[in-house]
Amino acid sequence: AQKVTQAQTEISVVEKEDVTLDCVYETRDTTYYLFWYKQPPSGELVFLIRRNSFDEQNEISGRYSWNFQKSTSSFNFTITASQVVDSAVYFCALSEINDYKLSFGAGTTVTVRA
Amino acid sequence: AAGVIQSPRHLIKEKRETATLKCYPIPRHDTVYWYQQGPGQDPQFLISFYEKMQSDKGSIPDRFSAQQFSDYHSELNMSSLELGDSALYFCASTARRGEETQYFGPGTRLLVL
């Protein structure tokens, strides 16, 4: 069963618009970790943010912010004032305390047009 | 800061040939993970090593094997290559198994003809 669901396949915006990526996860563990990774057209996987299950505080880091809600098992990610360089595939991923591998969602392709 | 190093970056092989992919983790990282990403797909976990011992195993074909050496670098050996093995292979490392962020290398793009 898919542990991480990213319902949005593709999102296209114009530069300076905000982009919110949805992520819903499924786990029975009480301790787990959630991540967002970015994969630009060059192919590498770049770590963006990580959240521990015991810390629901939402934060902002530069143009990135995230909304972690355990009650709805969601871990949404927002890019504020998008730029062309933000064009990439964004993956949400889950790591459980006794199963350390990353389980990725299917990814959301973000295209930012100038 | 030093990152994960993978070699080669690109590899072209014929069917039934063998390939060896190498991964050099970030210094002082003792855990290595291997992932396979097919075209248009998300990365899938293959295998991981902690302190030179295999720690977890995912959907890795029996034709593939891997190990972690005393200097913590890891090698993924792939034999009897098939067309379906064409993919991007990532290595990731962490400082402490299960409790740290996995940082990925640039990947090895394998094409099997």
Image (cartoon, grey):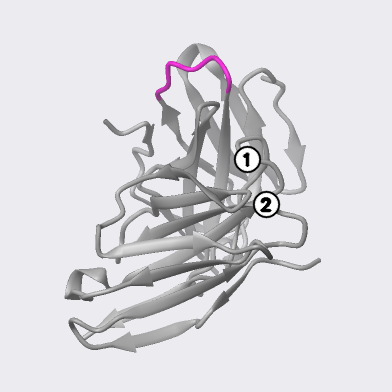
Relative to A97, is B27 on the left or the right? right
Q: Position of residue A104 (x, y in %)?
A: 42, 44
In primary-sequence order, the first of circles 2 and 1 is 2
Magenta part of the chain: A26-31
Q: Which residue is mark 2?
A: B30
Rendering quarter of residue B16: bottom left
The answer to whether the residues at label 2 and label 1 have Cβ atoms under 8 Å apart is yes
Relative to B102, is A105 on the left or the right? left
The kind of residue tagged 2 is Asp
As drawn, A54 above or below B38: above
Relative to A83, is B9 on the left or the right? left
Q: Which mark is residue B97?
A: 1
Which of the two residues, A36 or B103, is positioned nearer the viewer here?
B103
* Host chain of mark 2: B
Rendering quarter of residue A7: top left
Quarter of the image where the C terminus of chain B is located: bottom left
